[in-house]
Every structure is written in structure tokens, then in C-alpha cells.
Image: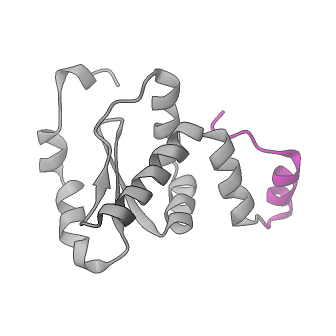
Amino acid sequence: MSLDVSPALLEQAERGEVDEAAFVDCVRTSLPYAWEMVSSLVAQLKVDGGEFADNQTPPPDEQARGQLLRALASDAIRGALQRHFGVRLAFQNCHRVAVFPLDSSVDETLARFTSVRSQLLNQSPELRDC
């Protein structure tokens, strides 16, 4: 299961109205490793500036890797994270998470990061089974 959904949040979804802040809180508590990764990269981007901030360190275990995969593979979760933090997220190699500002001046950098070429150049044998 991707998220630990409270009965109240499930009831909201069944009624058709879901408070996004409650959904984001559900993501935060259900996927703490992924949440911390994204929030720390957002903070790094704000402090250091630049076109993006990224993580190149593999997760400590499969549970953490699974959290990243669930957070970034789900359009709903990824979209909610992007709206909450005010960034665009990119993902490579099962663990390389990057945050980009919403500013269109970094569109070219984001396009390079998410390109097929970049994906191929960032392969490594150690990550073959991730």
C-alpha cells in the first residue's frame, strides 16, 4: 500500500471532495523518507540558489527506495508535492530526485535533466537492480 489513509480522508474521497492539505499531510506521514528528500532539496535550492538541487546518494534501504518510487511515480502524489513546495520534480535512476523552480528560465536545464541522453549517461552497474 502506498499511503496510510485515515478513515476521515478516505471518507472525504468517497464523498468526492478531498482537502489537498490533508492529502499532503497523508503523504508526509506515509512516505517520510521521500518527504524528507524533497523538502531538504527544496531547502537546499532556496539556500544555494541555482537552476536545481538534486540528490545523487542511493537510499539506505529498499523501503526508502520504494517510498521514492511511490511518491514520484504517482501523478497525484507527485503533483501534490510540486504544488505544496512550489517546484517541479524530476527523477532518474530510482533515486536521483531533483527539484527545479517554477521559473521558466530553467526550462532548458529541466529538459536536459529529463532527456533520454541524460538518463543514459546517468546509468551505473550498481543501480542495475534498483
Q: In the displayed image of the protein, which residue is found farthest to the bottom?
A: 104
Specify the farthest residue to the front. 47
- Taking the image as shown, residue 35 lies to the left or right of residue 94, namely right
Q: Is residue 33 one of those drawn in magenta?
A: no
The x, y position of residue 105, in whole percent, is: 23, 78
Q: Residue at x 80, y 65 (%)?
A: 16
Relative depth, front residue between 118 and 48 = 48
User: Would residue 112 be found to the left or right of residue 1 on screen?
Assistant: left
Q: How many marks?
A: 0
Question: On the picture, is 80 further left or further right than 69?
Answer: right
Q: What residue is rendered at 81% in x and 53% in y?
A: 9
Report whether residue 128 is seen.
yes
* In the rendered image, the vertical position of residue 45 relative to residue 63, given as above or below: below
Magenta span of residues: 1-17
Q: Is residue 119 above or below residue 113?
A: above
Q: Residue shown at 46%/38% (left/top)?
A: 69
